[in-house]
Image (cartoon, helix red, strand yellow):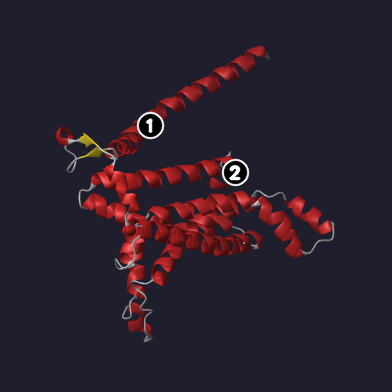
């Protein structure tokens, strides 16, 4: 018996060592192409130089003055406004979709989920440009069906609808996963106690699926907060988000001030990830 246990432990140790060796190339890739650029941006926050010329660099705190400019403050307000509104809309419709699928009698529910997240496999710029063509007054739909297009390019509605359309699938999967992991006996016990269907839903189902809601909300909030493609294409440059300011800074070779804004966004993102880890320590809603 002891020999069998020792053999099992030895085999498990060998498997873990083999997996560690297989993960090393990914770790090297992560260090070089993810961690190293962050370190470089952190250093650029505190130097004054044209482009990236190490010989002319000097220490300065002037780069942080960009945080007080009107355009950056407006961009931050716009970013949080659109991100929060998009997240709330996605929570409402995402929960409806996930709960309807959860309660349905469809045998292969994961096939329906696959069809729902299928657009995520295509390039985001293609999807955004397709939306932009639909949002114009003259588009392929108006040519085929003869009705006038929405003509909302460059407005708040275009950006909001674009974000909801793009990121809604991100929240459906975590919510559905959390709903599937609810013990049915808990819901049956609530009904046995005489509560109504709505009370059971509000007092039992919603709290037990809150991990999925939080995880999915972060998966919507963070890309909305840091993205720049949707406001650039659908907003037609009329509405700036902080992602647009960062993109313009790096395009115009203002790396130092762009690095300041990028690091601030990174801190917000890391803080949000820590919140998710506190709520969903096992990552149950992400699998």
Q: Could you tell me residue 87's position as x and y percent?
A: 50, 59
Identify the residue shown where x is 68% and y is 14%.
1
Secondary structure found at label 2: helix
Q: Nearer the viewer, mark 1 or mark 2?
A: 2
**Residue on which the image places disc 2:** 279
Question: As drawn, which residue projects farthest toward the right?
Answer: 193
Identify the residue shown where x is 38% and y is 28%.
24
Q: Could you tell me residue 90's position as x and y percent?
A: 52, 62
Relative to the observer, which residue lies in front, 144 or 42? 42
Q: Could you tell me residue 17's position as x and y percent?
A: 47, 22
Identify the residue shown where x is 30% and y is 55%.
245
Q: Quarter of the image for the C terminus: give it.
A: top right
When the figure is inspected, residue 162 is found, relative to residue 64, above or below; the finding is: below
Q: Earlier in the sequence, mark 1 or mark 2?
A: 1
**Direction from residue 196 to residue 75 in the image, left or right:** left
Q: In which quarter of the image is residue 45?
A: top left
Disc number for residue 27: 1
Secondary structure found at label 1: helix
């Amino acid at each position: 018996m002891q020999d069998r246990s020792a053999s099992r432990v030895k085999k498990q140790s060998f498997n873990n060592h083999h997996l560690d060796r297989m993960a090393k190339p990914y770790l090297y890739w992560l260090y070089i192409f993810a961690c190293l650029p962050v370190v470089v941006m952190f250093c650029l926050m505190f130097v004054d130089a044209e482009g990236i010329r190490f010989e002319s660099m000097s220490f300065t705190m002037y780069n942080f003055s960009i945080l007080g400019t009107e355009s950056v403050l407006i961009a931050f307000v716009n970013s949080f406004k659109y991100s929060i509104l998009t997240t709330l809309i996605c929570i409402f419709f995402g929960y409806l979709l996930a709960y309807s699928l959860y309660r349905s009698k469809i045998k292969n529910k994961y096939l329906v989920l696959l069809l729902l997240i299928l657009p995520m496999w295509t390039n985001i710029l293609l999807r955004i440009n397709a939306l932009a063509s639909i949002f114009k007054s003259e588009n392929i739909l108006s040519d085929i069906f003869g009705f006038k297009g929405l003509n909302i390019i460059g407005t708040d509605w275009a950006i909001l609808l674009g974000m909801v359309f793009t990121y809604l699938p991100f929240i459906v999967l975590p919510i559905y996963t959390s709903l599937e992991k609810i013990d049915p006996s808990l819901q049956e016990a609530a009904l046995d106690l005489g509560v109504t269907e709505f009370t059971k839903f509000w007092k039992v189902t919603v709290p037990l699926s809150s991990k999925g809601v939080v995880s999915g909300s972060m998966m919507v909030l963070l890309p909305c907060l840091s993205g720049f493609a949707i406001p650039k294409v659908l907003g037609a440059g009329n509405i700036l988000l902080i992602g647009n300011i960062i993109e313009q800074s790096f395009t115009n070779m203002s790396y130092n001030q762009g690095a300041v804004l990028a690091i601030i966004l990174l801190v917000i993102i890391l803080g949000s990830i820590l919140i998710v880890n506190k709520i969903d320590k096992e990552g149950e809603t992400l699998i």
